[in-house]
Image (cartoon, rainbow, N blue to C red):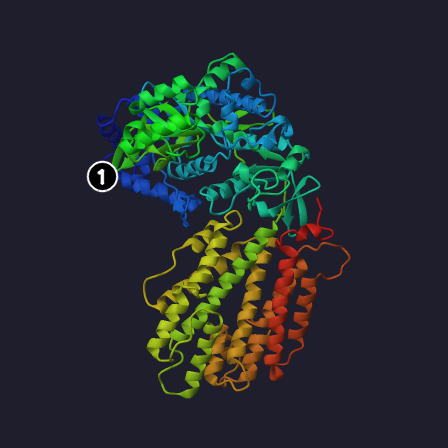
């Protein structure tokens, strides 16, 4: 095998052996690698692959894994933060042998069936409560027990479609359950992205270890949710709370991978107990929603009336069997830690079996004996809120031994007042796995999140792997680790070859599709305004560069040059980018240009425009290429002169324009994006002509106008005798062959609007199309010699009216799309 370590005199096998030897010398016996043995071929293969690509530099390997994750677009957000963080990926995967994994998978499937049975009973006959197997307080005391769901049988008869569990491995090698995730299980997308990144980095591992693939699991989930819909070819959406959700990037990736529509509550409407998606072609029926929205927020008519992210009437549609919701609202009550105290008994009653994956030991303080036991042994327990929500004393689990005297006294007092709000749990010590730290392999505690999805036949399919969350400190207590600081791919390996299953089309398929699918109104709105903001920023930068570029000498004393500078300044001031400068001297102009670039205190600067474009890019991950997202997410330049930074930003905008022009398929999504660009470019050109193109314009005015319209070269190729007003006006306003001119923009706008969907087939132009035709006629009949402010104002007004007509017709406006005739189309 070729070796990247050959330069230092060792082959990859020797490097891997040395890593293993050094690692084991400093590693506790609870480590996963110990269970496999030092000479385990799987671990040797993984580390040899790592050495082949990273040489002997493990820090470089970690950085390379991070770059792969960033290239895929993996990110997450901490609640309260505005910016996404890069997903922390370890280059060393967690290896689990297939035979061991089969035992884990069997326990996961059993647990999922058990939780489904408890939900059916809790929202139905409640025999478990009647028979004493569950205290009624566990149901009624949970904020996630949703009374409107009582007696409601979900479509297909299933409450749970997709579940996740956090597992830990104990010192003796046994696996146990730390937590259940049923409300909106997160992380499957991260598991998929981890696999993609590690596959790029350790490309030979798949064949060497016969690694189990994720694709069959996702295919089973997609088929399972479709099988519970009424229509044979259902439309499925992933319902997201929006871009500020911590796992929005994961949701966008999953929606794209599974072929689901990424939708928000405002995209949907319920009409006659059916759910519809607002699209540019009218209302399109939605058959199923994989929700990532808090269940209490999902329908303001059924649950929290203050919710602004839900869909009014959604639960009524579910009750009529017209929409499948995965998971069913109300499932989250079983996430409460208090249920862990009763699951072994309930499992025995319902199935006659013991739990294959045991819980960590739990004592619910709502029972007098258990409460006394917890209160008397605080130092040896973890104390946690019983229902997963903050109590009067605790907001999250805490080690009893870590409580201050004041906290301990407050807890004891609250246990006496409201014992049902607390649980005591054993202090779990975790097994460890290798992670790269300080340039070497070190042992760190980990937990494993696994996922299960219900297939078309109703059985559970368990994702072979999931992802590991790795602590940043050697302390192996679960309560100390928290959410973890690193993640790792989880590789399930065995001796048998694995079929190359993928959700991608097979290379020999004959199924063709040229229809790009449904375009939601919100997405069209976002893409339209992304185009406008990018063009607006580029136009603003053009004026700033003209002011700073010294093509005009503001200090020369020439009155005409100063007048031209004043007109350029006026363009910036009228746009609200910066306040009027006291004078037009070089120092004042520089400060003015810097303010127009960077001001944040209420001014509409380039920075503010850039922020708007970035915000739209953040909610358009499922529609834009990774390169476009990367450019939109790039940090705003803060170093160098204003002129240098303006040039850097303008090159970035040009790159974005090139990507949209050459890489976006000519779909309706692209049409809205380009339509926004054309409208904004036409508006900016009208503003420049009004400022610099009047009959008294000087040669400096006209030269600046050509600069702003990026038409200097075109003009000089045509006219060799100098600058004259009428030829400049003709080139910038009326020449249909100038891609920076008004006439060209008007023609492109008309073409886009003619190609976009209409609501009727009577051949009559809709409002936006009629306005575009009027605008085209206005430009086509204008004469350069008589072209002036009246015509420019008329064009500007038509552009504004047409933009408003586009918004009314295609974008979201409260309930208006529901009232319009002809919008319900299927």
- Quarter of the rendering occupied by the C terminus: top right
User: Residue drawn at (54%, 24%), measured in percent from left and top?
Assistant: 460
Left or right placement of residue 315 versus residue 8 in this view: right
Residue 487 in percent (x, y) is at: 37, 36
Q: Which residue is mark 1?
A: 8
Residue 281 in percent (x, y) is at: 67, 51
Q: Is residue 332 above or below residue 128?
A: below
Residue farthest toward the top in the current orientation of the protein: 352
Left or right placement of residue 166 versus residue 750 in this view: left
Residue 9 visible in image: yes
Q: Secondary structure at mark 1?
A: helix
Q: Is residue 459 above or below residue 199?
A: above
Q: Few, some or many C-alpha atoms within 10 Å of disc 1 (few <14, some 14-19, many ≥20)?
A: few
**Quarter residue 30 falls in:** top left
Q: Is residue 471 above or below residue 63?
A: above
Residue 498 in percent (x, y) is at: 47, 27
Camera-side residue: 440 or 380? 380
Camera-side residue: 317 or 7? 317
Residue 418 in percent (x, y) is at: 42, 28
**Quarter residue 431 falls in:** top left
């Amino acid at each position: 095998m070729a070796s990247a370590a050959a330069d230092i005199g060792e082959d990859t096998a020797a490097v891997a052996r040395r890593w293993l030897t050094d690692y084991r010398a400093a590693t506790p016996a609870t480590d996963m690698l110990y269970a496999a043995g030092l000479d385990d071929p799987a671990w040797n293969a993984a580390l040899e692959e790592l050495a082949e690509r990273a040489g002997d530099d493990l820090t470089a390997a970690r950085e390379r894994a991070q770059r792969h994750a960033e290239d895929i677009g993996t990110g997450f957000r901490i609640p309260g933060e505005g910016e996404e963080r890069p997903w922390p990926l370890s280059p060393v995967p967690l290896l689990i042998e297939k035979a061991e994994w089969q035992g884990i998978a069997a326990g996961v499937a059993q647990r999922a069936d058990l939780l489904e049975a408890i939900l059916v009973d809790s929202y139905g006959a409640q025999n478990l409560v009647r028979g004493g197997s569950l205290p009624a307080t566990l149901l009624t005391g949970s904020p996630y027990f949703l009374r409107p769901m009582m007696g409601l049988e979900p479509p297909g008869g299933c409450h749970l479609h997709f579940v996740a569990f956090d597992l830990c491995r104990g010192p003796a090698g046994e696996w146990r359950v730390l937590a259940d995730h049923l409300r909106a299980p997160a992380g499957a997308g991260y598991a998929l992205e981890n696999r993609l990144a590690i596959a790029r980095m350790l490309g030979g591992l798949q064949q060497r270890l016969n690694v189990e693939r994720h694709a069959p699991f996702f295919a089973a989930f997609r088929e399972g949710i479709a099988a519970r819909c009424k229509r044979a070819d259902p439309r499925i959406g992933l319902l997201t709370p929006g871009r500020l959700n911590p796992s929005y990037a994961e949701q966008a990736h999953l929606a794209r991978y599974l072929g689901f529509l990424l939708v928000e509550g405002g995209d949907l409407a319920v009409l006659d107990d059916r759910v519809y998606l607002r699209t540019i072609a009218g209302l399109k029926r939605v058959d199923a929603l994989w929700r990532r929205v808090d269940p209490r927020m999902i329908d303001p008519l059924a649950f929290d009336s203050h919710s602004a992210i839900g869909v009014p009437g959604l639960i009524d549609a579910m009750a009529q069997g017209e929409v499948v919701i995965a998971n069913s609202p109300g499932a989250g009550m079983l996430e409460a830690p208090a249920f862990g105290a009763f699951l072994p008994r309930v499992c025995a009653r319902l199935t006659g079996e013991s739990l294959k994956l045991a819980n960590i030991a739990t004592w619910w303080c709502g029972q007098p004996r258990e409460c006394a036991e917890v209160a008397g042994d605080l130092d040896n327990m973890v104390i946690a809120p019983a229902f997963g929500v903050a109590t009067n004393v605790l907001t999250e689990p805490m080690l009893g031994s870590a409580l201050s005297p004041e906290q301990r006294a407050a807890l004891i007092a609250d246990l006496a007042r409201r014992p049902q709000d607390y649980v005591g749990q054993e202090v779990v010590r975790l097994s460890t796995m290798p992670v790269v730290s300080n340039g070497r392999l070190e042992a760190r505690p980990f937990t494993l999140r696994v996922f299960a999805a219900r297939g078309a036949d109703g059985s559970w399919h368990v994702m072979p792997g999931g992802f590991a969350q790795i602590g940043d400190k050697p302390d192996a207590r679960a309560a100390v680790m928290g959410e973890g600081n690193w993640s790792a791919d989880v590789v399930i390996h065995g001796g048998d070859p694995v079929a190359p299953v993928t959700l991608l089309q097979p290379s020999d398929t004959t199924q063709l599709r040229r229809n790009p699918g449904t375009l939601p109104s919100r997405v069209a709105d976002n893409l339209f305004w992304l185009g406008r903001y990018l063009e607006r920023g580029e136009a603003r930068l053009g004026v700033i560069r003209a002011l700073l570029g010294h093509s005009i000498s503001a200090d020369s004393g020439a009155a005409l040059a100063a007048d031209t500078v004043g007109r350029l300044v006026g363009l910036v001031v009228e746009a609200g980018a910066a306040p009027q400068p006291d004078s037009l001297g070089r120092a004042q102009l520089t400060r003015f240009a810097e303010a127009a670039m960077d001001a944040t205190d209420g001014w509409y600067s380039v920075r503010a425009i850039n922020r708007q474009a970035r915000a739209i890019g953040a909610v358009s991950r499922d529609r834009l290429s990774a390169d476009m997202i990367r450019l939109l997410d790039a940090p705003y330049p803060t170093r160098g002169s204003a002129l240098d930074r303006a040039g850097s930003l303008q090159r970035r905008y040009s790159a974005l324009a090139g990507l949209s022009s050459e890489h976006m398929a000519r779909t309706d999504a692209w049409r809205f994006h380009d339509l926004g660009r054309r409208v904004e470019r036409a508006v900016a050109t009208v503003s420049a002509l009004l400022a610099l193109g009047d009959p008294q314009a000087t040669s400096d005015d006209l030269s600046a106008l050509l600069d702003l319209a990026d038409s200097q070269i075109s003009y000089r190729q045509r006219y060799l005798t100098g600058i004259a007003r009428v030829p400049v006006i003709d080139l910038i306003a009326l020449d249909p062959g100038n891609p920076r001119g008004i006439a060209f923009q008007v023609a492109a706008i008309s073409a886009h609007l003619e190609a976009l969907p209409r609501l009727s087939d009577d051949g009559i132009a809709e409002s936006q199309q009629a306005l575009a035709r009027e605008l085209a006629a206005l430009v086509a009949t204008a004469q350069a010699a008589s072209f002036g402010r009246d015509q420019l104002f008329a064009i500007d007004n038509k552009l504004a009216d047409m933009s408003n007509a586009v918004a009314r017709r295609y974008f979201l406006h409260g309930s208006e799309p529901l009232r319009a005739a002809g919008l319900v189309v299927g």
